[in-house]
Every structure is written in C-alpha cells, then in structure tokens.
Image: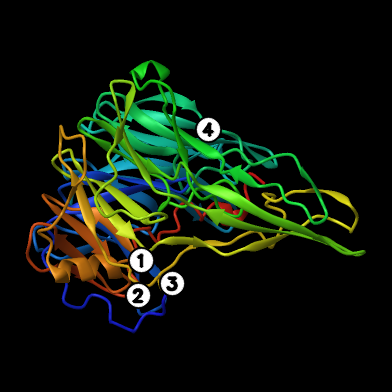
Amino acid sequence: MRVSRGVPPFLNRRRVMTAAAVVASGGLVTVAMAAGPVVYSEYTQSGERESRLALPDGAGDVKLPRTTAAATVSPDGRRIAQVGATRTATRKDARYASWLRVTDARGGSRVTVVEERAAGAGQPPRRVIGGRPVWSPDGSQVLVQVTSLTEGSYGRTERLRCVVDTKACSPAGRLPDDGEPATFGTDVVAWQATQGPLRWEAPAPVRGAVPVRCGGGAGRTPMPQATVAPIDPAGGFGAPLRLRGVVGSFESDVYPTTAGVAAVADGTVAFDLPDAVTVRGRLRCSRRSSSYRTTVSLGLPRLRLRTGGQDVVLPTPPGLRRGEGLTLLTLSDGGAVLLTRPTVTASPGTVSCGRGGRVRRCYPESDLSLEDPYYEDDETASGFAQRAWRLRPGARAFERVTTASRAALRTLKASEGLVPADGNAVLAVSEERIERVPLDGGAPTTVVRGRRLALELGGDGDTAMAAEGYGR
C-alpha cells in the first residue's frame, strides 16, 4: 500500500449517490449491488482505522460502532447488516457477546437478528458469530457464520441463514475445518436469484513429489482447480463450476485478477485462465544441494456463463490479451462489466530438492518453500491501458465500452478497488477518495475524501474477544 500524502480526513465530503457491499473469499470477489450508502473505513488523524457510513442524502457521514467488524448494504439500499462482538470487563470478570444486527440506511433503528452470549460471568461463549454478512437478492435473508468453541481450540464453523424480519435462523451447511475461527471472511461469493448462495472451494494443495534427474526436466504441470457450487445441491446450478487461476504461495487462494465470479440476471458469469501452467526448467545438482527453476505460463482468459445448469463459453472480448488481469462486477441492470487490471506476471522461482545426487524428489508447489514463484499484478507493465466491456442482460457476448471518457478510464486505472454503482457506473476506490465513474460519458465525481480509505472495516468487533485468547 502506498504511503498516504496526508490528505486530512473529513475534508470536502460530498453527496453520495450509490453504494456497494463487497463479499470476498478465497481470492474470488463478487459484489452485491446496493442503491444506498457506502460502508468504508479510513485512518483518522490519531492513527486509528475508523468504520464509517456515507449517507446518500447529503446529510454527511456517520461513524459506525467500534464493535462492528463487518457490514454490508441490502440490495435495495434500505438496510445494513452488521456483524460484531463486544467485551464488557469489570474488576472481577468479563462478559462477551457476538451478534448479527440490521439497521436502517442511516445506521439507526437497530434490530438484533441473532446473538451469542457467554454462559456466565468470566466464561467464554460457546459459539461466536462472524463472517461478512451476505444478503439475498430480495433483501429478505442474510447469511453469516458461527464458530463453535471447545476448551483450548476452535470447533466447527457453520453458515447461518437468517430471515431478517422474523429473526428465524437455520443451518446452511458446514465450512471446511481449518483450525481457525471464520470471523473475517465468508466462503459465499455470490447469491444467484434462481440458484441461491454460491460457495467457493479453495484449490486443493498439490501433493506428492515429482521425481527428476539431474540435468533433466519435468515439463508442464497444470494449475490446481478451484470450484464454485451452490450450498443447496438441489438449487439447479448443475455440476460445480471449475476455475483455474494463479494460486498464492500458500495454495489456498487464487489471485482475484486471474479468476472471478459474479451473479447476473441470466445466471452466473465467471472468468479464469484455463491454460495456466507451471513450466519447469532443468534440475541443477551439486554435492550439497539440488535446485529446480520454475516459471508460469498464463494464456488467454476464458469467460463463461452458467445458465440453466449448462455452461456457455462466451466469445473472447475484443482486444483482450493473453495473461491480462481482470475485474468482474455485477451491474444494477442485471448485467456485468469486465475491466482490465495490470497484467499478472510471475517471476521465476527456485525450488529446493534436497541434497545432490542423480535423482531427487522435488516439491515444486510446496508452500513450505520460501522461494516459490511470486505472483503479482505488474503495475509497471508497458502499454497497459484501462479498457472495459459490458455484458447486457440476455446477451451472450461482452461488447467493448466506447463511451467512457478519458478521465473515467484514468481514474479506473489508478484505483485500488472497484465496486459497482447505480446505473452504468462504478465506484473507484483509492487511498484518498471514492469516486463515481460513469461508463457512458462524463467525468468522475468525488463521493468521499479521506485518509487511506478502504472498503474493509476498521472496527475491532471480532478481535476484542480474540485478544483475550478465549477458545485457545
């Protein structure tokens, strides 16, 4: 993250016209549209990250409670779902609670949908509510996560599906066990109107060694595949949607510029890199060690539309290049916009194969190696130009957006995050401002100015109890 140039917070705050709530998990990002406020955070002059809510009526910003750890706006922009936790301490003991609450668009009229409290004074709670809340398209339900606690460790994590108005919650499947509480993220990457919530399954680590001889190579190895599937198999989604992208060093995430998914009116749109492979070089041996050089070949991005349980491979958007990074966003009309990001590059890496000898078993994809290839967005790539394509509802091809102004394209290129706005526009988030960028002509307009802005909240709600070490 770049160092802020010191723009004072709360300077020249302007009327907010749109909002969007980000849902991120496992490296994949999708956005649930909301025609209301913007939930964001910024650093104050005292150096603390503060969670805020920018209102759409020009009345100014409001500060969210510090105990709020995550919040998302409903699709109609009228309500906000908030997850958080509290710790109340006295000289003798401490009490804990975690909760899902829903407020109006101004952060008022607070209603607790579900809450977990400690069994008694000084005792930890049996369960902790966490995760970023995810709204259903009609704004009637919210998905959150709840982690069971056992003495000395965290137990299973499940999803809760809550009907907001009746405060009725029911289990919606269990998350894979990873030994950590699911308090910061969610595995739900989209909520399709006809197929329901879609969950993200991280790529399985590449297991097993590759036998190679000194002076020889092992050729090419495909990237691991991740999958997107409904939490309810009877929802009509069909077989899991398999995606291939560039994996991170710990092999549990896929870089969001190489694989993504979004819900649209006609189904689910996804992009990935089907030809991405690890290219292995020659094994170099000495008496003391052996090493193996690896690079990554990315190929041309592929776009698909999953509709009626079937995949439709969409034509390659005009001008899309090999290995190009992408961002996919749902638009308010039920379509989608595809935006280029800096080209994804992978520097060569050296993998240790143990001591020297004629034959060695190497672990080129092991996350234990500190010298695996490092993947990043190449922001210095020569010739990078911001481009946009739009998929209209009912269409089966992305069309080039030619109506965006040069100022709009420059703002999109310089942004650190993108979310959809109302109509044919997106919100571009940088460290110092959030701007509404129209794609159909016109100059960007500033929504919020501040200091080191981000869409992630800065509240310590789901860290207050963890700081006490309960559940460990």
Nearer the camera: disc 1 or disc 4: 4
Mark 1 — residue? 50
For marks 2 and 3 on the same chain, the one whose residue lies earlier in the sequence: 3
Furthest-bottom residue in this view = 6
The residue type indicated by label 2 comes to: Thr
Mark 3 — residue? 1
Q: Are marks 2 and 1 in contact (CB under 8 Å)?
A: yes
**Label 4: which secondary element:** loop
Query: Is 217 placed above or below 341 here?
Result: above
Q: CA distance from mark 4 to mark 2?
A: 36 Å
**Label 1: which secondary element:** strand
**Label 2: which secondary element:** loop
Q: CA distance from mark 3 to mark 4?
A: 31 Å
The residue type indicated by label 4 comes to: Leu
The residue type indicated by label 3 comes to: Met
Q: Are marks 1 and 4 in contact (CB under 8 Å)?
A: no
Query: Is 222 placed above or below 52 here?
Result: above
For marks 3 and 1 on the same chain, the one whose residue lies earlier in the sequence: 3
